Image (cartoon, rainbow, N blue to C red):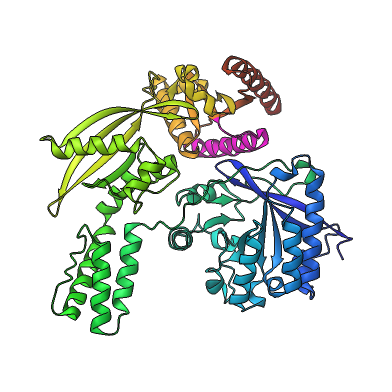
Amino acid sequence: MLSNLSFHYQPRYINGEISSYEALLCAAEQSINIQNYVDSVEDTVSFDLMVIRQVLEQRAVNHCASKIRIAINISINSLINFEFIKQCKEIFAVEKNIILELTSHDRSHDFIQIQTAIAELKSVDVSFALDDYGKGYLNSEMFIHLDVDYIKLDRKLIENIDQSYVAYSLVRTTYEKITKVLGKRVIVEGIETFEQLNLLKQFGEMEYQGFYFSKPLHVDKVQPTKSLPVIVKGQQSLCLALDRAIYDLNRSKSPIEVKLAIENLTKIDHYNIIGVSPNSFDVYAEQQRINENYKEILENCNSAPSLLMSSLISTCDAFVIIRDHQGNAIYNNQKHIDYLNMDLVNLPVGEVCRIFPDYRTCLALDQELLNGNSCFITSNETVETDNGSQFFHTYRQKLTHFGKDFVICSVYEDKGNISIDNLTGCFQKDYLESSYVKHSQRLVFIDLDGFKPINDSLGHSKGDEVLRDFAYTLKAILRENDVMIRFGGDEFILLFDSLCIDVVSKRMEKIRTSIEEYFLAQELYLSFSYGISTLDDGVKAALEMADQNMYEQKHIRKLAKQ
């Protein structure tokens, strides 16, 4: 059945590293339409088992097979076959690092049996993804509640997000539903442009695949994949908990049910955010009053100033956390969550202290502020990590709301004596002497092309403006973990945490195209030549190698123009 067909492997990325590969069926003859061929298969069980075995045979040839995570497409209909489940359990009791992607969900409606099958295969460490979400299948909304680990957004959802705000808003809403309500990971396929990627990055963490990153690879090119951070389940934000409680309140049918719903809401709204009064005699009047308060809060939360403040707190350089007088976290921004790899909201204080013993020091400083006469204190704190000591400056402010005290903490990492270039806002070259360099894997040396004519013909003031504009534009394209350094004059250094030189090279080509287009729109020619090196042998060796590679590229580019 598969004699004229083969497999290529599409890489998926998270934070610049390959997280898994999707096994894609390919035909030797261009006349064969793979999708039509797969759709024509009647015995999906035999076909899917054959695909699984052949993919695993190909993976086994790689000397790092056990470290390569593979996603294999199967028809969701195969999961209702007992023989399929039996053989899969035998296979995956030995073969690990497997994701089964459920396709063709229009062929089945047996939700309960599929859910049971997923549970059985999860017992042998198989992960699951629901493929093609947003493609238009009628039962996708039912299957999105399956106990799968990933929801994969169909390429049709994202193809117009850089052209249409409506399309962008739809994807953002879908992302919020999948990650925050359902607690699942998101995979986005079909990313072909930098503009699409840049918009998607604003939503939060997800996995990406598409021609922008890489075309499908031959099995010989497959490399070990990155381990993903564990999602801490069972935690729910205060906003979601309130929203669910309001939902329960409004579907209550009798006074007793309404009263019970209000009492439950009281337990959640212990900061009196919406003003719940559980002892109110007229429960229906109380229900109406709660709804009015909730609508008012939602309207205020969606106002321009509130959205701006929320955005500032969410994206600022500080780790921000707000605690009540008992030490319970009622808010922590995404930077704080990413640093701890855990959302502290709704987690008992004792449990947080057990996981992070240093947290007791934070609570003691909170109490010092709450019990003192001042409403603001600062402190310097040290945290020991696997990579050594990290130093932080913490600013605490006491706030009183509805007669209750809260502490808002803003924590900034101490960058030591590293200087910031006043013109460009980049780190200066002394960053290369700091301990932070060890977090990077690749160094890129950049020398601007076309800057000297601009500086000579338009003056140094314009030259400074162009340098600043270049730096700000490039930093906006880079990821949060990337580092940009002004080495001197019109020379810059980029530090990446990616191991794969092909990934870095492709990113640099995309970045250069974006920079050229940006300045061309201003009727200026500005580009750059670059050289890439590894930091394995230290910064000095990396600089020499990258500088040499950069000049070789600059020479080739000059010859190409002649």
Residue 369 falls within the magenta-colored stretch: no
In percent of width and height, residue 478 lies at 50, 37
Looking at the rendered image, the quarter that the C terminus falls into is: top right
Closest to the observer: 486 or 395?
395
Question: In the image, is residue 358 above or below residue 188?
Answer: above
Write the residue at 64% across / 56% down: 125
With 215 as the anchor, is 538 left or right in this view?
left
Residue 559 visible in the displayed image = yes
Towards the viewer: 36 or 353: 353
Judge by depth and name the residue closer to the eye, 265 or 12: 265
Count of numbered labels shown in the rendering:
0
Residue at position x 20%, y 76% in the image = 288
Q: In terms of secondary structure, what is the magenta stretch mainly?
A: helix
Looking at the image, the residue that sits furthest to the bottom is: 254
Query: Is residue 430 positioned above or below 192 on the image?
Result: above
**Residue farthest to the left?**
373
Was residue 515 drawn as part of the magenta stretch in this picture? Answer: yes
Residue in view at x 72 percent, y 74 percent: 81
Q: Residue at x 61, y 26 (%)?
A: 530
Residue 552, quarter of picture: top right
What is the magenta range? 496-523
On the image, the x and y values in percent for residue 3 come to: 89, 61
User: In the current view of this chain or complex, which residue is farthest to the right?
Assistant: 3
Judged left or right of residue 88, residue 443 is left
Relative to the observer, which residue lies in front, 186 or 70? 70
